[in-house]
Structures are given as C-alpha cells and as structure tokens.
Amino acid sequence: MMRVVLRHASPGEAHHQAAMLLGSAWGCEVCFGDESSACDWPDSGWLDSPGVREPKTSDVPAWTVWRTFYWASTLPEDEHGRPTGSKADRKLDVPEAELRALDFGRELGLNLDRSARPAPALVVDIDHLFAYRGRGATSYWGGLLRDFFRGDFQGVTERMWGPDPFYSLPFWSEFAQRHPQVSLQFFALLAAKKGPYDRGVRWSSPQTAEALRRLMLRFDLGLHLSYGSHDRPGGYRDEVKNLESISGRHVVRQRSHFLRKASTPALVHALCDLGISEDWSDEFADASGFRSGWASAYSVRSGFVQVPVAIMDQNVLGEGPRAIADRLHALQAAAWSVGAPLRIGTHWRIFGPRPDAERNAPDFAAWRAGLALWLSEGDWK
C-alpha cells in the first residue's frame, strides 16, 4: 500500500486523527513524521491544540479534522442533545471535508480517481417490527379488547389473522428483486429496557426472533441502539447480546435510535469496546445533507468507521414526490463527486400493508412516491 508522510516533528492525537481521515479519502496509509521524504504542508499549528475554533482553510489536515469532528458541536442542540442541521451556516448538500481532502491529495501529486458511480443504499430502521405481535400477552389482549370496544374491526381482524400492518418483509423482498443493484441494510430496535422514546416489540418474544431470523436469511441486520440504552450502565452490552442471541452472529454495525449521541467520542469508545466496527449514525435528525462533510465511510479509530447517511424520510415531510426525487438526485450527484454511494434512511413500518395503524403518525405517502420516482429515474440500472 502506498504511504504518504506529512512533515511534523512531534505529532499528537489530532495529527493521528488527520492521518486517518486523509487515508480514508486517499485510500492509502498516511502518517506524520520528520524523515527527509516527508511532504511539507501549510501547518497552522491548529492540530497541536485542536478545538472548536475554525483553522485556516489552507491547513487542510487541520480543517478536515475540525469539519469532521468539531464543527457540529458549534450548532444549537435540540431537546435530545442532537446538533440541529437546520441551523447550519454552511452548505450541507456537498461532502465538503472529503472534497477538500481529495483536492489536497491531488496537490501532493496523488492519482485520486473518484469517477465511480455506485448504486445507492437504503438504510431501514426497524423501530416497529410489528404493530400487534411480539409485544407480550398483556399488550396483545389489551389491544384486542380496546379495538373491539372501539369498533375497530379491521384492527381486531389484523390482530387475530394478520397481515400485521407494519410487517414489511414482503415489500423488501419484492424490492430487492426489482432493484438488485440497490443494497439494503436493516437495523433492529431490541430494547433491553425501554426508555421514554422506545416502543416496539419485546426482544425476548419468539415471534420477534422468528421474524428477524427470516429477515436475515436474505438481508444484513445490525443493531438499532435504543434511546434508553445510553442512560443505563451496561445498556449497550445488553442490547448487543439481545441481537446476538437471536442471530447467532457477532454484531458488527449499529445505528442509534433517534440518532442519540451520534458520533460522540463516548459512544465511539463504547462501541469499540463491544467489538462493533461500523456506526451508521452520522446524520442530522432535522436536515438532509452530509453532517460531518463526508459521503464515504471514514476511519475514526483503527478498525472502526463512521458511515454517513445523507437523508431520511422525516427530513422531507411536507414536500411533494417531485421535490423529494429532485433532492435525492442532487444528493446522489454530490456523493458521486467523491465516488461514494448515497445512503438513504427510512423506516420499516411505513412500507407495511397498513402503516396508518399507528395513530397520529406522520403521513409518508409522498416519501414513498418520491422514492419510487427517483428509483425509476436512476441511471445506475
């Protein structure tokens, strides 16, 4: 593997972060050192004392670290402690950290071909595997009686004989046949103890295990860490064990429910300790775009990468199908500018046979139509 050395006599932790990021963009080993073959670069000194202060744009290694790891922390936070992308003072629809890193590599004489146009990936959060099943006997019978006395005989019928309104595996199996180039990555919420924003099935339910094993016969399944797991000692470990007990496989990737604590050093450290190697939480909850300035997966630690997701269904509520398709086309062009796939987040239940079984839920009909329109117009066929 090619090796690039940037000149610095005493590199610190931030220099190693910069080397990992540049290596992710350049596809080679990057390090800092003081040997005679090292490349000079416009060192501003920022990497010697990193922080939220933006470094000079000419110091690309420093600026890349700042844009990737520090910039989002300067944004206002919402009630869940998440940075608000809608308050950003810069364009989010281009992977600017990655683009700048690539330009810097070309200035150093590296041959960096990023002309690939990979097919997209759909990232499916299974917050609600079922509407009615897998929730325990009390929930089942209580819901059945409630629907009966309310006169909701469709709900009664679905509870007793199906199909479950949220169970969308038939849709995704057909989708995979119609769009074989598009990859699918599923993440299951299996809360050990439910927090205030955790609903869905019980991980210990035989119906839950059977459904997830059926899903894994064809598709890859990662963990959707619950909202409450962040507040309990051992919460992450419990939920990793829950999924591993069902799958019989080691968990290698996760995506945080509600994007809670996404990309924070504490979460990265905990995931690394659990042997998880991919975190797919690099995304804003309230805005589409490239949160950390990357479209490609990028290394944070040795053996651990962040995988950016550029848009999800809730980002486009209120928009029509044509506007949604156009936005997806624009984001895909931006991802292709660095040779990366566009990753799109969505939710399992809204592709089930009757997603409106969740009362007072947002209407995602325009999202489904816009996604279908974009897929029909895609040129990766």
Image: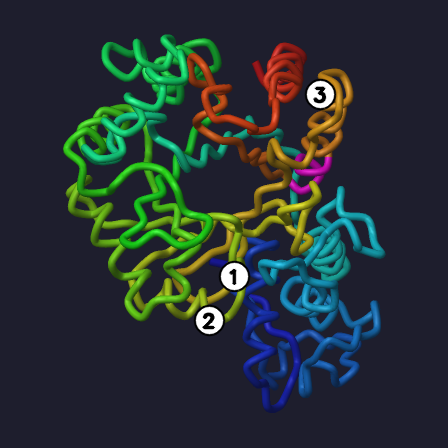
Give me the residue at 72% from left, 52% from top: 85
Q: Which residues are magenta?
A: 334-338
Marks 1 and 2 in Cβ contact (< 8 Å):
yes
Relative to 199, say whether 24 is above or below.
below
Relative to 343, say whether 41 is above or below.
below
Report which quarter residue 140 is drawn in: top left
Q: Amino acid at mark 3?
A: Ala
Marks 3 and 1 in Cβ contact (< 8 Å):
no
Give me the residue at 34% from left, 43% from top: 222
Q: Nearer the viewer, residue 278 or 255?
A: 255
The secondary element bearing badge 1 is classed as loop
Give me the residue at 60% from left, 28% from top: 362
Q: Amino acid at mark 2?
A: Ala
The secondary element bearing badge 3 is classed as helix
Residue 176: % across, % down: 41, 16
Specify whether residue 350 is painted magenta.
no
Give me the residue at 27% from left, 29% from top: 142
Residue 98: % across, % down: 68, 53
Relative to 65, say whether 175 is above or below.
above
C-alpha separation, residue under disc 3 versus residue under disc 2: 36 Å
Q: Identify the mark at residue 266; answer none if there is no mark.
A: 2
* Residue underneath mark 3: 325
Q: Is residue 5 left or right of residue 279?
A: right
* Residue underneath mark 1: 261
The secondary element bearing badge 2 is classed as helix
Q: Amino acid at mark 1?
A: Lys
Residue 171: % across, % down: 41, 14
Badge 2 crowding class, 10 Å Cα cut-off, few under 14, some 14 to 19, many 20 or more, is few
C-alpha separation, residue under disc 3 versus residue under disc 1: 30 Å
Report which quarter residue 135 is drawn in: top left
